[in-house]
Amino acid sequence: MPLLEVNQLSITFTQYDRGLRQKKVPVIQNLSLAVERGEIVAVVGASGSGKSLLAHAILGILPHNAAVSGRMAFDGQPLTPTVIRKLRGKRIAFVPQSVQSLDPLMRVGDQVRQAVRTGDPAAEQQRAFAQYGLAPQVARRYPFQLSGGMARRVLVSIATVSGAELLIADEPTPGMDPAVVQETLRAFKAFADKGTAIVFITHDLEAALTIADKVAVFHAGATLEVTQAADFEGKGERLRHPYTRALWLALPQNGFAIPDEEAGETQICSLKHEA
């Protein structure tokens, strides 16, 4: 049984039109995903494809004007609002996309120590900061005293010290130094090796493929394809959907190729850089 199951998830927002008339705006339709223990599933797609909304639905933090249908379950238990509140921050940890999620009135070291579930909180916080390249004195700073990259590393630290069974990371690496990005990815891989299930939401397909077991490709609020990371090879012959193949072929190592479906061949983009 998968640790996390999402079946035919649909999300619709109620908005006001002219004349205070209400209208329904569907943003996700029939989206499905499953994650096993010890598995990393990368969720990739363009902005607006529903990646972050999926995370917010699992965590029960959608706005009040959102209507949700479909089925979500954690360890076989339906994710009702009551169950989500019990799991969130304990068995399910979240690395949010926005650094504004940090408490502006609490020192960041205290925020990390507060998330520790087992072991010595101070020791775990110090270990996490050392792992992600944060100097010891950073623990005494407030969020406004951090750069964007430092704040993201604090958010990753909070999630990784929690000992959660499911880790949802929403764009955790932008603004980080390349070396820290690699360390973060290695840490996620190490957690998965110990049995943690990870949903890795990202625009960076290349980074995702370094650690993911599976890749779920989202577009316009729907799941286009869920495939093994190993299928991303060659010219994408093993990828079923043209959009997935286009994402793969557009990577630099593939020559920024654009699949021409009508011609049945691949064209190469010529990139011109102006000074």
Image (cartoon, helix red, strand yellow):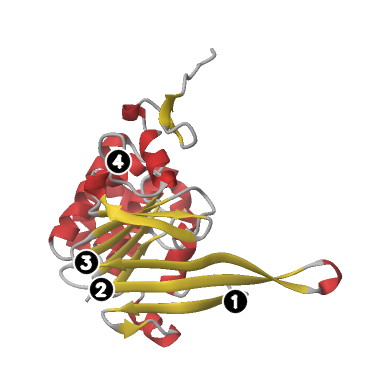
Q: Residue at x 38, y 72 (%)?
A: 6
Q: Secondary structure at mark 1?
A: loop
Q: Residue at x 34, y 54 (%)?
A: 154
**Which of the marked residues, 2 or 4, is nearer the chain's N terminus?**
2
Q: Secondary structure at mark 4?
A: loop
Instruction: Give the amino acid at mark 3.
Output: Pro
Q: Nearer the viewer, residue 143 or 180?
A: 180
* Residue 61 in sight from this viewpoint: no
Instruction: Find out whether the residues at labels 3 and 4 contact each other: C-beta distance under 8 Å.
Output: no
**Which of the marked residues, 3 or 1, is nearer the chain's N terminus?**
1
Quadrant position of the N terminus in the picture: bottom left
- Residue 109: image location, x then y, percent: 32, 58
Reading the image, the residue beneath label 3 is 121
Reading the image, the residue beneath label 2 is 3
184 to the left or right of 20: left
**Which of the marked residues, 1 or 4, is nearer the chain's N terminus?**
1
Q: Identify the mark at residue 64; answer none if there is no mark.
A: 1
Q: Residues within 10 Å of mark 4 (few under 14, many from 20)?
A: few
Q: Using the numbered discs, state the Cα–Cα distance from disc 2 to disc 3 in whole angstroms.
A: 27 Å
Q: Secondary structure at mark 2?
A: loop
For marks 1 and 2, give the one nearer the viewer.
Answer: 2
Instruction: Give the amino acid at mark 1.
Output: His
Q: Residue at x 15, y 69 (%)?
A: 119
**Which of the marked residues, 2 or 3, is nearer the chain's N terminus?**
2
Q: Nearer the viewer, residue 37 or 98?
A: 37
In this rendering, is residue 270 above or below 249?
Answer: above
Q: Identify the mark at residue 237; answer none if there is no mark.
A: 4
